[in-house]
Image (cartoon, rainbow, N blue to C red):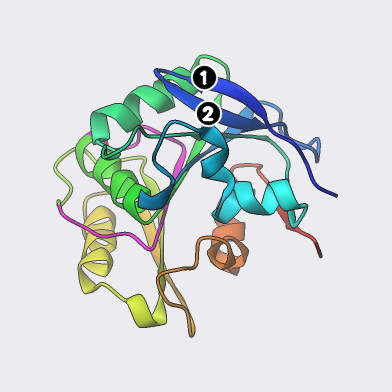
Amino acid sequence: MNREPRRATCADLPALLFAGSLQRDSCAAIMWLHGIGERGNEPILVAKYGLPAALAAGRASASCDVICPQLPPNEEWEPDRVLSLVRYARATYSKVILIGFSLAGLGALNLVAQHGAACDLAIAIAAECRHWPTADQSGVRLVAVQGEHDYRPEVSNFVELVCQSGGTAEEVVVKGGDHFISESALWQPELQVALSAQSVLLRQHEA
């Protein structure tokens, strides 16, 4: 069954909001940050790929609200901007799980690098890595998901540095995957375990 999101605002950005449908944890929220192609001035674009696309098409359901802000044209997910989004969500939700794909995967890693454990769980899918961790990594929980054919060794090095600096991080490689794993990455067992540890459930459905 298709699910219609409602339009919302997240900090200074327009957003789509998918209400949680599995009634497991109403105190948590997933914040989905999109890739480079969904930037613009029309929030419905953020439902083109990944978790929001799966929710809209009925291929997935979530136990909590899913917030999907949209970047303006030509901008990036800078760490201070991502931090402001997380803080905005924390005014309503006690837990914030950040999932970033591609350009936003880089944003998720940069948030961890510069601000440490700003969110309860950070998931970076098909990310680049441009900066090493400089903030205290205590309390960080990070999952980095890469496609086998889009593998970036620097992301693996980032994961190792988080662990060496007191955080908890793991790397997941999608066998046979390329860069375009925004949806398939969600169903990797390691990612599901990390979400479940936050009392958050994503369920996959046949469309």
Q: CA distance from mark 2 to mark 1?
A: 5 Å
Name the residue rendered at 58%, 45% in the picture. Answer: 47
Residue in front for this viewpoint, 4 or 112:
4
Q: Residue furthest right?
A: 1
Q: Main secondary structure of the magenta part?
A: loop
Residue 76, given in percent of the width and then of the height, sits at 27, 40
Residue 102 visible in the picture = yes
Label 1: state its secondary structure.
strand
Mark 1 Cα within 10 Å, few/some/many (few <14, many 20+)? some
Residue that label 2 marks? 15
Disc 1 residue type? Answer: Thr
Name the residue rendered at 58%, 21% in the picture. Answer: 8
The answer to whether the residues at label 2 and label 1 have Cβ atoms under 8 Å apart is yes
Label 2: state its secondary structure.
strand
Residue 146, given in percent of the width and then of the height, sits at 39, 70
Report the quarter where the C terminus lies: bottom right
Q: Which residues are magenta?
A: 115-130
